[in-house]
């Protein structure tokens, strides 16, 4: 008869050292989870990052619209004299300068998001060290899997970090 | 051959600011009949209603991308000869080659300037 299904007798003892190791690991795990401060992340930092990035998108869109409006107005300026033309152009240039001040504020907002991401990265890194577990198989949710498959099949790579991967000159050579 | 400034142009981009920029550049070049759509599906509907002399399309849009739009246009007997310029931030060589194989007439990488757009329109539509 095979021995695989044999249950250890109740009297069989587990070495105390093994139990101590498990207890120590659980204590470390609890400390690691506590240091993650997951509730603070989900309650404060991640919503803050979401809000700040939303504000950045809104501010850049608003500034772009103001700059576009000024540029379009300059294109259709009607003036009888050069001085009148110059005055009107300068007024629009003033509007453009004013609209460009968005960069200072959005820069500060983005810095806050970068800091939050840095905190998140640090805590996850510490947690990973404490629990000493390697990454497991990733299970994509269906929506993420669909997005990934679509991006791959339709070559949706997005803008490259350091500018165009293929310069316009090289593209022009392909079409000449 | 001079450019036909009266030809209708369809601009396809989901980013309204980009549509506005291209519209202004086209206006500066003398084109007045410019329509727009925010993705390939909307563009196809417009292409079936009106004869356009040129399509200027972004690549990355939802639900239908510019690449899918290009393939639909080239597969449609009534539309297959419509000049098509891709204007996109997708700058990987695989994108450019795929678009060329699918029949794009020219390809502009964002950001671009008025001169680049003008040169490409002239190359595709005459001049």
Image (tube, grey):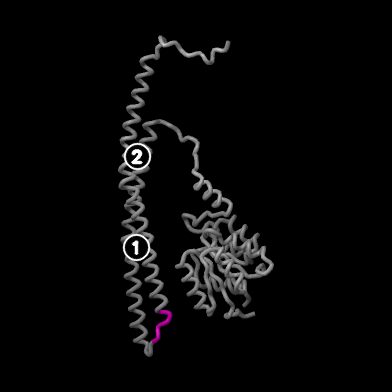
Q: Which of B8 and B102 is in front in this view?
A: B8
In contact (CB < 8 Å): disc 2 and disc 1: no
Q: Which of B34 and A3 is in front in this view?
A: A3
> In the rendered view, would you say B91 is above or below A37?
below
Q: State left or right for residue A173 relative to residue A136.
A: right
Residue on which the image places disc 2: A123
Q: Nearer the viewer, residue B119 or A18?
A: A18
Which residue reaches farthest bottom? A80
**Disc 1 sits on a residue from what chain?**
A
Q: At 60% across and 74% down in the image, what residue appears?
A: B50
Residue on which the image places disc 1: A103
Marks 2 and 1 share the same chain: yes
Question: Quadrant of residue A125 in the image?
Answer: top left
Main secondary structure along the magenta-highlighted residues: loop
* Mark sitting earlier along the chain (2/1): 1
Q: Nearer the viewer, residue A89 or A30?
A: A30
Task: Residue B61 in the image: state x and y as whole percent.
Answer: 52, 60
Task: Residue A11 in the image: state x and y as whole percent.
Answer: 40, 9
What residue range appears in magenta?
A74-78
């Amino acid at each position: 008869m095979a021995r695989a299904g044999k249950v250890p007798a109740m009297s069989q003892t587990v070495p105390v050292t093994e139990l101590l190791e498990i207890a120590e690991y659980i204590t470390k795990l609890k400390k690691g989870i506590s240091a993650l401060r997951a509730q603070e992340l989900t309650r404060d930092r991640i919503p803050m990052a979401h809000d700040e990035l939303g504000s950045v998108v809104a501010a850049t869109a608003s500034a772009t619209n103001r700059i576009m409006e000024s540029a379009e107005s300059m294109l259709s300026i009607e003036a009888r004299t050069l001085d009148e033309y110059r005055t009107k152009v300068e007024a629009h240039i003033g509007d453009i300068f004013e609209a460009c001040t968005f960069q200072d504020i959005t820069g500060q907002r983005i810095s806050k998001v970068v800091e939050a991401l840095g905190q998140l990265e640090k805590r996850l890194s510490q947690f990973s060290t404490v629990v000493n577990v390697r990454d497991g198989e990733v299970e994509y949710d269906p929506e993420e899997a669909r997005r990934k498959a679509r991006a791959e099949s339709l070559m949706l790579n997005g803008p490259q970090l350091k500018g165009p991967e293929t310069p316009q000159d090289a593209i022009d050579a392909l079409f000449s | 051959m001079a450019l036909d400034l009266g030809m209708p142009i369809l601009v396809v981009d989901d980013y309204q600011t980009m549509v506005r920029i291209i519209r202004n550049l086209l206006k500066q070049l003398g084109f007045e009949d410019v329509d727009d759509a925010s993705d390939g599906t909307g563009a196809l509907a417009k292409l079936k209603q009106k004869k356009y002399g040129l399509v200027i399309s972004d690549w990355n849009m939802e639900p239908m991308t510019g690449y899918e739009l290009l393939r639909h246009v080239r597969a449609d007997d009534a539309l297959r000869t419509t000049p098509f310029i891709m204007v996109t931030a997708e700058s990987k060589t695989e994108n450019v080659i795929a678009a060329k194989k699918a029949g794009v007439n020219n390809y502009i990488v964002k950001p671009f300037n008025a001169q680049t757009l003008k040169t490409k329109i002239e190359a595709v539509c005459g001049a």
